[in-house]
C-alpha cells in the first residue's frame, strides 16, 4: 500500500501491528510509545520528511483517549495540573513545529536532535531504575501500599460478583490552586508544587515535543516524579491528557503550515497516522490489563535499553 504523503510503500497491517506491540509494552512501563514509533518510521519505513512529526502526533490523538478515560474513571486525574500542562505546552508545541520545519528539515540533523531526546529519556530511566535498586524509598512504599489496596479492591469486587465500588480506591482531592501554588492530597499524602515552575517546564517540554512529534508526555512525567516529587499514579493522567491536547494542536499547526512549504511534506499522513493510532489504542488497553503479570522493572530495563541503543545508533550515523 502506498502512502503518498509519507512517500513510502508498506503493507497496511504493518503500522497497526507495530504500534500495538510498542504500546503494549510501553504502557506497562507507564511510558508513551510515540518516542519509539518515530525511530521506527524514520529508520525502518524510511519516512524522514518533516511530516513524520505530525503523523506521530496523530498517533497520540487516536491512541491516548482510552488511557485518559481509565485514569479519570479511577479518580486519579489532577485536573489543575492537567490544565497547567496544557496551557504551558500549547505555545511550546507550536514553536517546536516551526523549528522542525524551518531549521531541522534535513533528516540527518533531525536524527541528531532525536538522538539527544532519546538519550535523555533513556538515561533518566536507567537512573531511576538504579535508584530503586539501592533499597526501598518512601515513594516506593507508598506505591506498594496503593497496589495492595488495588488488589484488595479487586478481590472484594470479585467476591461481590463484579459489583465492587471504584470509590473505595483513593482518589485525588485538590486542596488549593492559584497562580502561585498547586496542592492536592492522594492516599493520605499531601503534595504542593509551584505554579510557574510547572508552567515553565511544560513550555520547554512543549517545544521539544513539538519538534520531535511526541507531545512531551514521555519527557514531562519523569520531571514531575523526580524533581517535583509527585506520585506517578497521579502524574500519568495529566501527562497523557497534556500530550493529547498538544498533539491535536500540533497536527492542526503542521496542517496549517503545509501551504507555506509547497515543496516539502509538512502535513501529516492521515491514513498512516490513524493506522498507527488504532494499533496503539488496542496495545495500550491490553498492556494495562496484562501489567500485573509482568515485572515492571524488567519492562523498564527493556525500554531503557531500546531507547539508548536507538539514540547511540543515530549519533553514530550522524558522524559516519
Image (cartoon, rainbow, N blue to C red):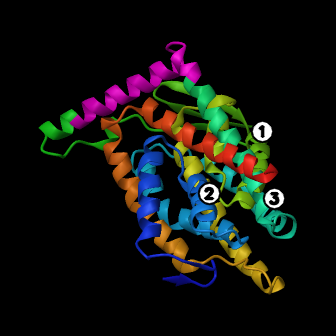
Q: Which mark is residue 109?
A: 3
| Image quadrant in which you'd find residue 49 | bottom right
Magenta range is 130-154
Magenta stretch: includes residue 142: yes
Q: Of label 2 and label 1, which has the lower sequence position? A: 2
Q: CA–CA distance between discs 3 and 1?
A: 31 Å
* Mark 1 crowdedness (10 Å alpha carbons): few <14, some 14-19, many ≥20: few
Label 3, label 2: how far apart the Cα atoms are: 14 Å
| Residue situated furthest right in the rendering | 103
Label 3 SS: helix
**Residue sitting at 52 percent across and 47 percent down?**
237
Question: Which residue occupies 45% across, 30% down?
Answer: 297
On the image, numbered disc 2 is attached to which residue? 39
Magenta residues, dominant SS class: helix
In the rendered structure, the answer to whether residue 29 lies left or right of residue 120 reads left
Labels 3, 1: front one: 3
- Identified at 71% across, 50% down, the residue is 314
Question: For residue 151, which numbered disc appears in the image?
Answer: none
Q: Residue furthest top?
A: 135
CA–CA distance in space, label 2 to label 1? 31 Å
Residue name at image x 48 percent, y 47 percent: 26
Mark 3 / mark 2, whichever is N-terminal? 2
Q: Give left or right: position of 317 versus 290.
A: right
Q: Earlier in the sequence, mark 3 or mark 1?
A: 3
Q: Nearer the viewer, mark 2 or mark 1?
A: 2
Circle 1 — which element? helix
Q: Residue 197 got which mark?
A: 1
Can residue 91 be seen in the rendering of this structure? no
Q: Position of residue 201 (x, y in %)?
A: 76, 43
Q: How many neighbours does mark 2 have within 10 angstroms: few (below 14), some (14-19), or many (20 or more)?
A: many
Determine the secondary structure under disc 2: helix
Front-most of residues 164 and 36: 36
Amino acid at each position: 500500500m502506498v502512502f503518498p504523503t509519507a512517500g513510502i510503500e508498506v503493507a497496511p497491517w504493518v503500522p497497526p501491528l507495530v504500534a500495538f506491540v510498542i504500546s503494549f509494552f510501553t504502557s506497562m512501563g507507564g511510558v508513551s510509545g510515540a518516542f519509539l514509533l518515530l525511530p521506527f518510521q524514520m529508520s525502518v519505513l524510511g519516512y524522514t520528511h518533516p511530516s513524520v512529526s505530525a503523523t506521530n502526533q496523530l498517533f497520540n490523538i487516536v491512541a491516548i483517549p482510552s488511557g485518559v478515560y481509565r485514569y479519570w474513571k479511577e479518580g486519579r486525574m489532577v485536573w489543575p495540573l492537567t490544565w497547567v500542562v496544557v496551557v504551558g505546552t500549547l505555545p511550546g508545541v507550536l514553536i517546536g513545529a516551526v523549528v522542525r520545519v524551518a531549521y531541522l528539515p534535513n533528516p540527518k540533523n533531525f536524527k541528531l536532535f532525536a538522538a539527544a531526546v532519546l538519550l535523555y529519556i533513556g538515561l533518566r530511566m536507567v537512573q531511576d531504575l538504579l535508584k530503586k535498586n539501592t533499597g526501598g524509598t518512601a515513594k516506593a512504599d507508598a506505591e506498594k501500599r496503593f497496589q495492595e489496596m488495588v488488589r484488595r479492591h479487586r478481590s472484594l469486587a470479585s467476591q461481590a460478583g463484579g459489583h465492587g465500588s471504584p470509590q473505595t480506591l483513593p482518589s485525588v482531592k485538590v486542596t488549593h490552586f492559584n497562580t502561585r501554588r498547586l496542592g492536592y492530597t492522594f492516599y493520605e499524602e499531601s503534595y504542593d508544587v509551584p505554579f510557574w515552575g510547572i508552567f515553565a517546564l511544560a513550555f520547554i517540554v512543549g517545544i521539544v515535543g513539538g519538534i520531535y512529534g511526541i507531545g512531551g508526555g514521555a519527557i514531562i512525567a519523569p520531571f514531575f516524579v523526580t524533581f517535583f516529587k509527585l506520585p506517578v499514579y497521579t502524574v500519568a493522567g495529566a501527562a497523557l491528557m497534556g500530550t493529547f491536547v498538544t498533539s491535536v494542536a500540533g497536527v492542526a499547526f503542521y496542517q496549517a503550515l503545509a501551504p507555506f512549504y509547497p515543496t516539502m511534506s509538512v502535513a501529516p499522513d492521515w491514513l498512516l497516522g490513524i493506522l498507527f493510532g488504532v494499533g496503539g489504542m488496542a496495545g495500550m488497553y491490553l498492556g494495562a490489563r496484562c501489567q500485573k503479570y509482568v515485572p515492571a522493572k524488567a519492562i523498564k530495563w527493556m525500554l531503557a535499553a531500546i531507547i539508548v541503543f536507538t539514540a547511540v545508533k543515530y549519533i553514530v550515523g550522524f558522524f559516519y
